[in-house]
Image (cartoon, helix red, strand yellow):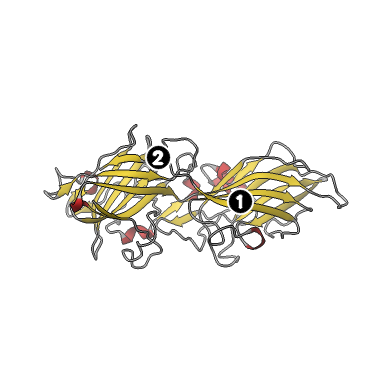
Amino acid sequence: MDTETKTYKGRTSPISTLRHSANALLLFLPAFIFLSGCSAESLGPDTCGQDSIRSKVLVRQTCLTKAGGILHGCTADVFMFNDDVLQRIDAYQRVKIGRDNSLDAASREGRKIAVIICNPQQENYDWNSISSFESISEIYSDLRMEDPERPLMSGVMQVNTDNGPEFSMDVSPLLSEIHVRSIRCDFSGRPYAGSRLENPHIYLANVNSMAAILDSDISSPASPVNTDGYPHESDRCMKHPEMVHVALDTGIGSETVYPAASLFCYPNSSDEDSAGTPFTRLVISGEINGKKYYYPMNINRGEFGYIEGCPGIGRNCRYVFDIVLKKTGVTDPTVPVSGETVSMSGLIRPWDILPEDMIRF
């Protein structure tokens, strides 16, 4: 089969912008879509015409967890759009992926835009509005509904089913990880030398909670949480608040602590730190000699980046940091600290690609 991997960036000219990468994002998906009097959920060779075809897809997954077989048992939404000017939907199915990481679906023959979504965030949808590939760009994913053990993953590419029933395809999550590998205090030469940061917490502020499913570069955060610099909002509203807030069970002194704290968030590559487009921050809080201090750090920005590529947080990336607290922090958690207060070194690592799994449809 003739296949061509392409990327969708932004919302204008969807077909022409599918030219840079195989990965795209997808979330809120309908359980029923209607096309020419045929239920999309049952669209196949026995129900919707003589030009139908079954295909075998090899799926390369980029995984957020260390455990293998993340696709096993999850729900997958499979869309096929006509690869023409109108890009109308041709087929849709919601299926469960079996133990062999396989599923069956069908479409009509010809040039198609294929979209696969694993781990959608809702069990049932009642949207008839997804009639074309372009309309998917109006759908948003919600960080508050994410499960880091079963992250929403998706992929999109162009295929030609006339050339055979097999092709390979990438799926990847929208989530990225902010990993604090080590942290210690170095208050040498200060009046409070030898002091410790007690009752420490590590969390994210200005966390982008909504993301357009087909945007690979999210420049403006939507509905950010923890904008007041505290973690309380995320603790209340998120299905898995541990994604953005962890409390350490030990204080931090001059000896290095390895908390292995992993936080998860959506991309944020906004150009300026303003009320409408705040930078996502990593915050460390705790008490020094009985007084509460905060260390808000702009992630992959200015003095604390950027590490590789574009500043800010990209899609499906892993940022690993080693942190040294050099003086007392600030008392206002919305005010970012400078490099004089905190030393933060790190690197960005893409997620490991697991061995190929086979999906048939």
Q: Position of residue 279 (x, y in %)?
A: 59, 60
Image: 72 above or below 135: above
Asked if disc 1 and disc 2 are in contact, CB closer than 8 Å, the reply is no
Q: In this figure, what is the number of numbered marks? A: 2
At numbered mark 1, what does the secondary structure look like: helix, strand or loop? strand
User: Which image quadrant: the C terminus?
Assistant: top left
In this view, the residue farthest toward the left is: 50
The amino acid marked with disc number 1 is Leu
Which of discs 1 and 2 lies nearer the camera? The answer is 2
Q: Which residue is mark 2?
A: 355
Is residue 350 toward the left or the right of residue 337 in the image? left
Is residue 54 toward the left or the right of residue 77 in the image? left
At numbered mark 2, what does the secondary structure look like: helix, strand or loop? loop
The amino acid marked with disc number 2 is Pro
Q: Earlier in the sequence, mark 1 or mark 2?
A: 1
Q: Which mark is residue 106?
A: none
Between 2 and 256, the residue placed more toward the observer is: 2
Is residue 29 toward the left or the right of residue 348 in the image? left
* Residue visible at 40% across and 40% down in the picture: 355
Between 122 and 251, the residue placed more toward the observer is: 251
Is residue 199 toward the left or the right of residue 145 in the image? right
- Marks 1 and 2 sit apart, C-alpha to C-alpha, by 32 Å
In this view, the residue farthest toward the top is: 99
Q: Which residue is mark 1?
A: 204
Classify 10 Å Cα crowding around label 2: few (below 14), some (14-19), many (20 and above): few
